[in-house]
Amino acid sequence: MAQSLLDAYMPVAIFLAIAVIFPILVYFITRLVRPNKPSPLKDTTYECGEVPEGEAQIQFNFQYYMFALIFVVFDVAAIFLMLMALVFTGLSDAAKAAIVLFVAVLFVTTNYALKKEEVLTI
C-alpha cells in the first residue's frame, strides 16, 4: 500500500522539484549573462517617457481602501456562491446550512461596512 502511494505522488514530487529549482536556476543564469550598467536614469520612475514631477507618495482617503475591501468581499463571495450553486443538488443539509450561514454573515458584515459614516462620505 505504501509503495503504491509513493508511486502515485511521484509525479507531483517531480513537478514540485522542477517548480522550485527552475526559477532559482534561471535567476542565477540571467545574473551571469545580463550586462550590469547602472545609471541615475535607470533609477527614476518610468512614466511613459515623461520626467516625474513632485512627490510620488500621496495619501489617499481611508474610504477608498474600505470600498476596495468590500469589493474583494463581494468578489470572493461571488466565487464561493457560484461554486456552491454548481454542486448544490448533491449537498447535505449541513452543507446547505453552512451556505446559508456564510451568506448571512456576508450580508450582515457588508451592511455594517456600508452603513458606517466614513464609507458613505465618498
Image (spheres, grey):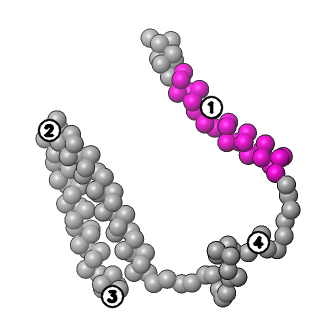
Task: State the residue at coordinates (57%, 84%).
Answer: 58
- Find disc 1 in the rendering and name its residue: 17
Marked residue nearer the N-terminal end (2 or 1): 1
Q: Secondary structure at mark 2?
A: helix
- Given residues 29 and 71, the one toward you in this image is 29
As shown in the figure, which amino acid type bears the numbered disc 4?
Asp
Ranked by sequence position, the earlier of labels 4 and 3 is 4
Callout 2 amino acid: Thr
Of the 4 image quadrants, the one containing the C terminus is: bottom left
Mark identifier at residue 105: none
Residue 65 coordinates in the image, percent (x, y): 43, 75
Q: Name which residue lies at 66% across and 88% down.
A: 54
Q: In whole angstroms, how far apart are the C-alphas of marks 3 and 1?
A: 51 Å
Q: Is residue 31 above or below residue 69?
A: above
CA–CA distance in space, label 2 to label 3:
43 Å
Q: Amino acid at mark 1?
A: Ala
Q: Secondary structure at mark 4?
A: helix
Q: CA distance from mark 2 to mark 1?
A: 39 Å
Q: Which residue is mark 3?
A: 121
Q: Nearer the viewer, residue 106 or 80?
A: 80
What secondary structure is found at the residue carrying circle 1?
Answer: helix
Q: Which comes before the other along the chain, label 2 or label 3?
A: 2
The residue at which mark 2 appears reads as 89
